[in-house]
Image (tube, rainbow, N blue to C red):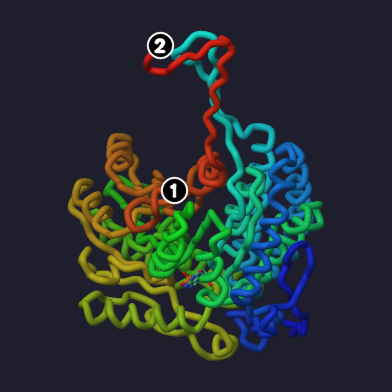
Amino acid sequence: MMNSDKTYKNLIGGQWVESLGRKTFENINPADSNDRIGTFQQSNAEDIAAAVAAARAAFPGWKRTPSPKRAEILYRAGRLLAERKEALACDMTREMGKPLEETRGDVQEAIDMTLYMAGEGRRLFGQTTTSELPSKFCMSVRSPIGVCGLITPWNFPMAIPAWKMMPALICGNTVVIKPAEDTPLSAFNLVKILAEAGLPPGVANCLSGFGPEAGGPLASHPDVPVISFTGSTETGREVAHAGADHSKHLCLEMGGKNVIIVLEDANLDLAIDGAVWGGFGTTGQRCTASSRVVVHQDIYREFLQRFVERTRALKVGNGINPGIQVGPLINEAQLRKVEQYVEIGTKEGAKALCGAKRLTGGEYDHGWFYAPTIFSGCTPGMRICQEEIFGPVVTLIPCSNLENAIEIGNGVAYGLSSSIYTRNINNAFKAMQEMETGIFYVNAPTIGAETHLPFGGTKSTGNGHREAATTALDFYSEWKSIYIDYSDRLQRAQIDT
Ligand code: ADP
């Protein structure tokens, strides 16, 4: 892999500029520490303030641009993303580590969201309704809010920025995005394409940098009324506190401890395919990862043996190479976290049936590779069954029946995604009704969200908002209710009826 001396700058007010603090950091390939991707600006509060000022200045013009015109820009961006999909996916694999097949999917998700929200440019529907008074007309319309501060994680380096930017933009807001420090390039690729597609200067601003130094000042900036954050639960809480003083609109998407339930009548081949993909896809680094599998006791042994066999055969390596199924962890801290949890699980009395070690030797010595790990002998209350590990570690828990499985499934602090494998439609519907998660699948793993359905979770996963779909429009716009009285006299609601 070629080393790059390229320096990437921040996009503020349509200009590519250096950080005012003159500090930079390196973006390094998690699969190969010899591969330097480029130098990025280590932005600070002053840079954030400049970006917010640019976004504020651009707001009146963008807000008054008819939404079908805004949409034309998004359509052009969608086409550019599609034309460059392969190069964008290669950049992403290099900075994030997941295999090319998956990064192509990530870019595709950004394309889908861009085109979906472009379509909304000719809808953005409100309601028209009747009045309780004669000669009076009522309707509700969406209004843009202002500058949206977007703080994104590294696991979906382009998809998540697109999930947040596209609905914000189509609604007429301007944005300042601070992507994760591990994967700034994909967010830069995205805003560069938006600029090429004709987005006016200042409408989308992008700054690289670290959490407390750049994300913090964005979250607390008084001129940023909207904050959308995806990341860890701890950071989400900090962001919520930072926003509380200014009564900001906050959308928080945080952790998960998702469950696949496998009943005794399940198609076992399908369930195992799902558990492998849901548990080890993206090296388990998805908020929707299937990190727990609850299996009916009658099929537990068989499931376990076959699941372990399949997991051992997974090809772990540099995701840029053909045939690789599992890439590295994103960074050393994440590797250490996985190592610690495996130690915790072992001490708790669970048994690692495969993996449970860092991979070393050859190319592995230059990256953060960890062998896919399955724990059996788990009880639902163990820390490894309760806490989000965000790595290639799956815990297996036996259950006695559907009710027991649902109880175990719901018995965590999080509520993002869950799934059931069964051929019994009654059981499927019962689980659908009883599972407390924001997303539920039948005969599929807990991952695989599509852009036109609401995305988000209950309990500690979120704060009640949903991303994607038209639900995102509700977050990025403010409702305005309008009453038009053409009676030519004073009519008093609730009184003159
Ligand atoms: P992870 O543990 O998955 O890396 P984080 O929650 O730390 O998740 O990071 C998600 C995003 O939040 C990143 O863009 C990161 O830079 C940012 N971030 C981290 N700490 C803060 C903070 N104190 N305030 C605002 N943003 C932060």
Q: Identify the residue shown where x is 49% and y is 61%.
A: 230
Q: Position of residue 93 (x, y in %)?
A: 64, 70
Which disc, if any, is residue 133? Answer: none
Quadrant for residue 222, please give it. bottom right
- Residue at numbered disc 1: 465
Instruction: Identify residue type, mark 1.
Output: His
Q: Residue 316: in sight, yes or no?
A: no
Residue closer to the observer: 455 or 70: 70
Q: Identify the residue shown where x is 33% and y is 66%.
A: 305
Q: Identify the residue shown where x is 44% and y is 58%.
A: 288
Q: Position of residue 127 (x, y in %)?
A: 54, 25
Residue closer to the observer: 136 or 42: 136
Quarter placement of the N terminus: bottom right
Q: Position of residue 472 (x, y in %)?
A: 53, 45
- Residue at numbered disc 2: 496
Quadrant for residue 488, please give it. top right
Q: How packed is label 1: few (under 14 Cα within 10 Å), some, or many (20 or more)?
A: some
Task: Give the mark nearer the N terminus: 2 vs 1.
Answer: 1
Depicted 112 relative to depicted 31: above or below:
above
Q: Is residue 485 left or right of residue 345?
A: right
Q: Is residue 189 left or right of residue 373?
A: right
Residue closer to the observer: 427 or 497: 497
Quadrant for residue 137, please give it. top right
Depicted 391 relative to depicted 138: above or below:
below
